């Protein structure tokens, strides 16, 4: 069994749906294949905008443009594939839009969008992708099985950032499915909470969906198809001579994802690593290219595999006398950030100066500052804490490589290169 995942850029128009169907068909000629799909490009953003308009009572106005866009994709697909069962497609599409109206109107009556309603609305794009891909594949195969992720992919209780409960997910998958078909489809992004209510895996969560499905079906490999040839050793949009990496380890891929390289959803690697399922990144537009293979070990002797750049980072520094005398300040700092559903992307601590510095994405800086000042109001007013320092418009540069820890002089070369480029280093952290 092989699992394929196609993102929104691979499903942006009817021609790309056709390419995806051809890739799936080629895969099925060799092995049973399960495919996870995202919404067509731009559709999820439109659906999120719809949910944001619910409190103002203007959400239903967003439905017509979404319907027109998806209907256009259907009609274009009918032109490419005249043998599609058009009546069936149009009937299912009509039901999909009717449900979108129903959920939206119900939320507008409430004056807000409940979490479960939000979870149903924003996966409409993924369900459309399943509808169209299913119709195309049924012109080639007698049986296409469609999996419902809300039946089995279960989020852990109390997860502010959705994390899948693998044990519960595997148990429910075995209860619901005894797969006989070689052609399997599943919408990405969608899931259930610990009580069985609809939820999502978070934005760009379809990679995570594919990894979870790969574990459930005991896949030999998980292929993530996108619009680039694989993983590069630096951002090809910034570095003209960036080189494609043929292989990399799970750890290297996780580090790159976490520190800004747009390879995979960061949580995707964890289940694949746990079950030792290799993952290959491939280009939908150049399927003949081998892409990048992510597995237990990287087949290279390079010390540094890649350099990443994360722009628009904000750095907070918390310091003061209370850092010496009172236990639990660090815990309070990070609990404050966690309770606001914000992300800490780097921590640097100075024991000599009794201060803690940490980074958050730039767009979260204002809220993080407000929350910290509220949480430590008494300490700030009494002088036990110094005024919280905030530096914005920073960038985080990261070098990644499994072999670095055994080599001398890597850090020296890194800092020398930055000095030659007249770049000031504000904070340092090391894995």
Image: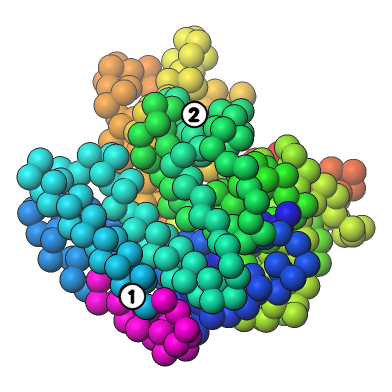
Write the residue at 84% across / 43% down: 405
- From this view, report whether residue 159 is shown above or below residue 258: above
Could you classify mark 1 by the number of other residues whose Cα lies within 10 Å: few (under 14), some (14-19), or many (20 or more)? few
Q: Secondary structure at mark 2?
A: loop
Q: Is residue 73 magenta?
A: yes
Quarter of the image with the C terminus in it: top right
Quarter of the image with the N terminus in it: bottom right
Please identify the quarter of the rendering in which residue 399 is found. Answer: bottom right
Cα distance between the residues tagged 2 and 1: 40 Å
Write the residue at 60% across / 70% down: 141
- From this view, report whether residue 375 is shown above or below residue 196: above
Residue range of the region highlighted in magenta in the rendering: 66-85
Q: Looking at this view, is 82 or 201 the one in front? A: 82
> Left or right: where does residue 118 sit relative to residue 60?
right
In the rendered image, the residue lying farthest to the bottom is 79
Q: Which residue, given by chain and number where applicable, does mark 2 sit on?
A: 156
Could you classify mark 2 by the number of other residues whose Cα lies within 10 Å: few (under 14), some (14-19), or many (20 or more)? some
Write the residue at 45% across / 79% down: 84
């Amino acid at each position: 069994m092989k699992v394929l995942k196609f993102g929104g850029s691979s499903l942006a128009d009817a021609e790309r749906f056709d390419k995806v169907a051809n890739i799936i068909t080629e895969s099925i000629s060799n092995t049973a294949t399960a495919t996870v799909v995202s919404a067509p490009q731009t559709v999820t953003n439109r659906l999120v905008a719809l949910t944001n308009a619910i409190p103002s009572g203007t959400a239903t106005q967003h439905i017509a443009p979404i319907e027109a866009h998806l209907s256009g994709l259907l009609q274009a697909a009918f032109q490419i594939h005249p043998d599609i069962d058009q009546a069936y497609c149009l009937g299912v599409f009509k039901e999909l839009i009717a449900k979108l109206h129903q959920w939206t109107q119900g939320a507008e009556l409430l004056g807000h969008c409940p979490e479960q309603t939000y979870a149903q609305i924003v996966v409409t794009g993924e369900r459309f992708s399943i509808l169209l891909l299913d119709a195309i594949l049924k012109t080639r195969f007698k049986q296409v099985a469609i999996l419902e992720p809300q039946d089995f992919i279960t989020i852990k209780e109390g997860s502010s950032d959705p994390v899948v409960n693998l044990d519960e997910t595997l148990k429910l998958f075995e209860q619901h499915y005894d797969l006989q078909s070689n052609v399997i489809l599943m919408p990405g992004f969608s899931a259930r909470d610990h009580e069985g209510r609809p939820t999502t895996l978070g934005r760009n969560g379809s990679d995570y969906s594919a990894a979870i499905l790969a574990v459930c079906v005991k896949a030999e490999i998980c292929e993530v198809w996108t619009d680039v040839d694989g993983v590069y050793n630096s951002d090809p949009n910034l570095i003209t001579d960036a080189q494609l990496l043929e292989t990399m380890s799970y750890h290297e891929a996780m580090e790159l994802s976490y520190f800004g390289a747009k390879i995979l959803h960061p949580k995707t690697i964890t289940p694949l690593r746990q079950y030792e399922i290799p993952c290959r990144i491939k280009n939908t537009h150049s399927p003949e290219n081998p892409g990048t293979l992510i597995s237990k070990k990287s087949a290279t002797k390079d010390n540094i595999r890649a350099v990443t750049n994360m722009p628009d980072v904000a750095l907070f520094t918390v310091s003061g006398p209370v850092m010496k005398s009172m236990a639990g300040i660090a815990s309070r700092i990070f609990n404050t950030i966690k309770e606001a559903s914000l992300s800490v992307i780097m921590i640097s601590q100075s024991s000599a100066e009794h201060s803690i510095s940490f980074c958050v994405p730039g767009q979260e800086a204002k809220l993080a500052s407000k929350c910290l000042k509220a949480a430590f109001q008494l300490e700030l007013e009494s002088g036990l804490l110094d005024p919280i320092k905030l530096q914005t418009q920073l960038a985080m540069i990261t070098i990644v490589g499994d072999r670095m820890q055994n080599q001398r002089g890597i850090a020296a070369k890194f800092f020398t290169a930055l000095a030659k480029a007249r770049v000031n280093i504000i904070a340092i952290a090391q894995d």
